[in-house]
Amino acid sequence: MTAEPRTSPSTPAAHVWNVDDLPALEFDPLLRELLDNEPVARIRLPFDGDREAWLVTRYQDVRLVTSDPRFSREALVDRTVTGMAGHRIASPAGLNFADPPYHTRLRKIITKAFTGQHMKRLRPLAQQRTGELLDAMEQQGPPADLMRHLHGPLPLAVVCDLLGVPLEDRERLASSPDLILSTGAGAATSNAAKEEVRSYIVGLLEERRGSDTDDLASVLAEAWDAGDINEAEAVSLATAVLVSGAHAVRNNSANMVYMLLTHPEQLAALRSSPESLPQAVDELLRHIPHRNGVGLPRVATEDVRVGEVLIRAGEAVYASYLTANRDPAVFSEPDTLDFDRGGTAHLSFGHGPHHCMGAMLARMESEVMLAALLPRFPRLRLAGPPEETEWQSKGFIRGPQTLMVTW
C-alpha cells in the first residue's frame, strides 16, 4: 500500500489550473509558463481542489515519470487526487489503472488485434469507407461539415471494424464516446453513456464466445473463455478501445485538417510532395495541442528525484505530453510546424507501459483521410474566417464541433 505523502516546508505554492476552454488550437499559457520557468510544479485542478499534485513538463522528465516503476497507476485506485473531472472516466478493471506485470498480461492479450497484419486488413476498409463518405459529401455540395461527413463517421467505422461491431449496431454507439470523454456532460450523463456501451459490449462478447473470427471482440471472448481475463476486464478493454479510438481520432484528424487549412504554406508543401504525408502526420501529431489539461496521474511509491525536485512517496504526479512535444531542449523551434523535421520522436501517443496501443491505427486513419481529401478537393478551404469555426467545450480531447469547408 502506498504511503501517505509527507509534506515539507519547502514545497512550492500550487498553481490553480482551471483548464478553461482555449481559442481554437492555442497552446495552454500555463503549460507554456511552467515548461519555461518551473518544469516540476505543484498544481490544483478543478475537482478536489484542496488537494495538490506535481506536474512535470520537460521531455526527459515526462519520459522518466511515465516509464519508471516507482510511479504507479495502480496506486490511484484507492486514492482521490485533484483532477479534471468529478468522477472516474476509465474503469479500474482495465489497463489505465494497472501496473506491470498485471498490465503487461492484459496488454499482451489485446495487442493480438493491433498487429501489422490487422492494420493491412483495416486500411483498405478505411479507404473504401472514406471514398464513400466523400462521395456523399461531394454529391451534397458545398459548404459541408467535415465533422459530419468524414471525421465523425470514419473513425467510428474503423474501430467498429476492429472490434467486429455489425453495421446495424453502429448508430447506437455513435454519440457515446463524446459523452463519456467530456467534463461538460456531467457525471450522470457520462455514466449513463458508459453503461450503454458496457451493456452492448457484454452482449457482443457473449455472441463472440466460440467464434473463429479474428476481430478484437473474438480475441477478448477467447481470452475470457480461457480464463486469462475475467468479464470485467474483457468489457473494460473493449470499451476503452471503442471510446478512445472513435473519439480521439475524430478530433485529432479534424485538428490536422484545420491546421492545414489555416497554414497555406504547409498545405501547399504537402500537396506538392504527397509522399511526405506520413512524416507530415507525425509532425501534426507533435505540434497540435490535441487535449485539454492532462491525463491520468501516477503516484510515487517511494521518494524520487525529478529534475531538481524531490517527489515524496505517496504524492501524485501528472506528466504533460503536450509540453514534452514543445520542449526547446529537444525540438528546435518547437512552436513551428515543420514537415521536414526529423530526429527525436514525439510523445503524443504516450511513453512507457501505457504507450497507446492504437498508435499505428490512428496514424493509418489520419493518413487515409488526408490522402483522399486533399487531392480530391484541390481548392478545399474553410467556408468562413477561421475564428468562426465552432469548437467543442469542456472536452478532454480538443477538436472542432463543426468544421465547415467549401471547395
Image (cartoon, helix red, strand yellow):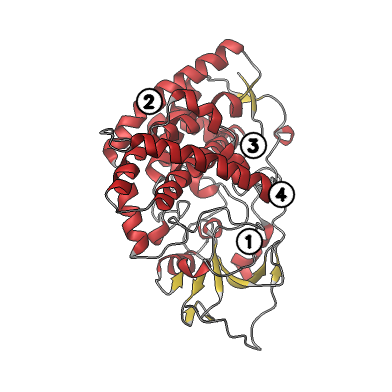
Image side of residue 221 versus residue 325, left or right:
left
> Is any part of residue 253 visible from this angle?
yes
Proximity of marks 4 and 3: CB atoms separated by less than 8 Å? no
Image side of residue 352 versus residue 138, left or right:
left
Proximity of marks 3 and 2: CB atoms separated by less than 8 Å? no
Q: Position of residue 312 (x, y in %)?
A: 53, 82
Q: Position of residue 111 (x, y in %)?
A: 32, 47
Proximity of marks 4 and 1: CB atoms separated by less than 8 Å? no
How far apart marks 3 and 1 lie (CA) works out to 21 Å
Give the mark toward the camera: 2 or 1.
Answer: 2
Q: Earlier in the sequence, mark 4 or mark 3?
A: 4
Question: Dividing the picture into quarters, in which one does residue 70 lie?
Answer: bottom left
User: Considering the numbered disc 1 on the image, is that residue within a helix, a strand or a loop?
Assistant: helix
Which residue position is annotated with label 4? Answer: 21
Mark 3: amino acid: Pro
User: Considering the numbered disc 2 on the image, is that residue within a helix, a strand or a loop?
Assistant: helix
| Residue drawn at point x = 40 percent, y = 21 percent | 128
Q: Earlier in the sequence, mark 2 or mark 4?
A: 4
Q: Earlier in the sequence, mark 4 or mark 1?
A: 4
Give the mark toward the camera: 3 or 1.
Answer: 3
Q: Nearer the viewer, residue 337 or 66?
A: 66
How far apart marks 3 and 2 lie (CA) works out to 25 Å
**Are there few (<14), some (14-19), or many (20+) residues within 10 Å of tag 3?**
many
Mark 1: amino acid: Leu
Q: Earlier in the sequence, mark 3 or mark 2?
A: 2
User: Considering the numbered disc 4 on the image, is that residue within a helix, a strand or a loop?
Assistant: loop
Q: Earlier in the sequence, mark 2 or mark 1?
A: 1
The numbered dot on residue 400 is 3
